[in-house]
Image (tube, rainbow, N blue to C red):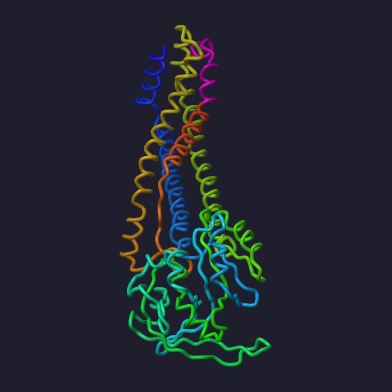
Amino acid sequence: MKSLVWQLARRYRSTRHTSGFIRFISASSTLGIGLGVAILILALSVMNGFELALKQRLLAVIPHVELEAVANRLDNWQAKLTTYAEVEGVTAAAPYIKANGMLRRGSEVKAVQLRGIALDYERKLSDFEHYVQSGSLAQLEAEQLVLGSGVAEALGVAVGDTVQLMLPRFSEDGRLASYSNRVLTVTGIVAVGGQLDYSQAWLDISALAGYLEMPAGSVQGLAFRVDDIFAAPIMARKLGQLSEDYVYMLDWVRSQGHVYQDIQMVRAILYLVLALVIAVACFNIVATLVMAVREKESDIAILLTMGMRPNALIKTFMLLGWLNGLVGTLGGAVIGVLLATFIESIFAFVTRILGRSLLDPSIYFIDFVPSLLQWQDVSVTVGLALALSLLSTLYPAFRASRVDPARVLGQR
């Protein structure tokens, strides 16, 4: 009986006596399922790639946790850093000073966020040294400066050039009183690939402390790297409770968490929308089978008269409809996997052709389209499409099993 079910389903699928309209609806459902599966696999892979880029690029450069002094001053930071470094979950710690300033080169002026770092500590905390585009970070001395690639491009400077740094000076009541000028030499250009390149500059922590007229040996705050990035808010509170100073407890979720949340939201929306696209394409199978049942009523009546069981007839039309879903799903899965594998190269090619990136690095945290294919996503997508395809065959198949042979053959 299984062989008969398979032979009938294959015959009905391959016969050329079916009306052209039924064949068109059948092909449309197969194409729609394949397109939905391919785009869903590609979209999920790109979202996985963005999440991985967030972890491996942005969160590898910025601190996970920061304790920033309310009074903008932490003394005896070396001893405090040693104490914090022993806390479970902390993998690295470093002092820092932050300030806003203006960089000038000729007629070009650019506002930047300055970060004073102790290079020996920063190497353990951050991987930004791996993204050096030109120059070197072997050492960072006074009167030296490292720029993000976007800042360097805006100013039109290269390694070895000098820039003028302008820092504001405030009066005791917090009003802008004047500004100070420093001439610094660019010793390195960093290209992380995103907003950081267009806003950040690094210099020696002692030099920045001197420019800001801070007391010798004091820093603005302490930055930490933790082993579990999603536990950063908990670690911030834990470290803050150990502090004897009044500090702001900051973490990456506060500053960059919206990026991660946006990725998760877009992933959920894409999955829902594309799953509905697949569902609509699958339910075209219903229309195809209903019309096929009406067209094959005579064959069905003869089969029932010859003793074919209704259950076998149900299986025949379920298999007939499911084959459309199977072909579309497998074809879409293959195309989706290929697109997810080569989307980075395709995007890079398009970028070269257009001469600019479609992702503005001054807006997005990266300037390329990453992709991370996970076979779990492929399996879930394929399983969803096959399940919807099978469900859409139930009503037409049961309708075929209830054809009245006497009525149909009597009319013929």
The image quarter containing residue 188 is bottom left
Query: From the viewer's perspective, is residue 85 above or below residue 409?
Result: below
Viewer-proximal residue among 251 and 213: 213
If the image is split into quadrants, where does the N terminus sit?
top left
- Which residue is pictured at 37% across the width and 22% down the height? 10
Residue lying at the far right of the rendered structure: 173
Q: Is residue 167 left or right of residue 154?
A: right
Viewer-proximal residue among 313 and 241: 241
Viewer-proximal residue among 309 and 296: 309
Q: Position of residue 217 (x, y in %)?
A: 54, 79
Query: From the viewer's perspective, is residue 394 above or below residue 354?
Result: above
Residue lying at the far front of the rendered structure: 79
Q: Position of residue 255 (x, y in %)?
A: 57, 65
**Residue 274 counted in the magenta span:** no
- Which residue is pictured at 62% across the width and 56% down the height? 234
- Which residue is pictured at 52% across the width and 17% down the height? 401
Q: Position of residue 48 (x, y in %)?
A: 46, 50
How many labels were placed on the picture? 0
Query: From the viewer's perspective, is residue 51 above or below residue 330?
Result: below
The image quarter containing residue 261 is bottom right
Q: Which residues are magenta?
A: 394-411
- Which residue is pictured at 51% across the width and 33% down the height? 388
> In terms of secondary structure, what is the magenta stretch mainly?
helix
Q: Is residue 338 left or right of residue 113?
A: left
Q: Position of residue 123 (x, y in %)?
A: 42, 66
**Residue 406 counted in the magenta span:** yes
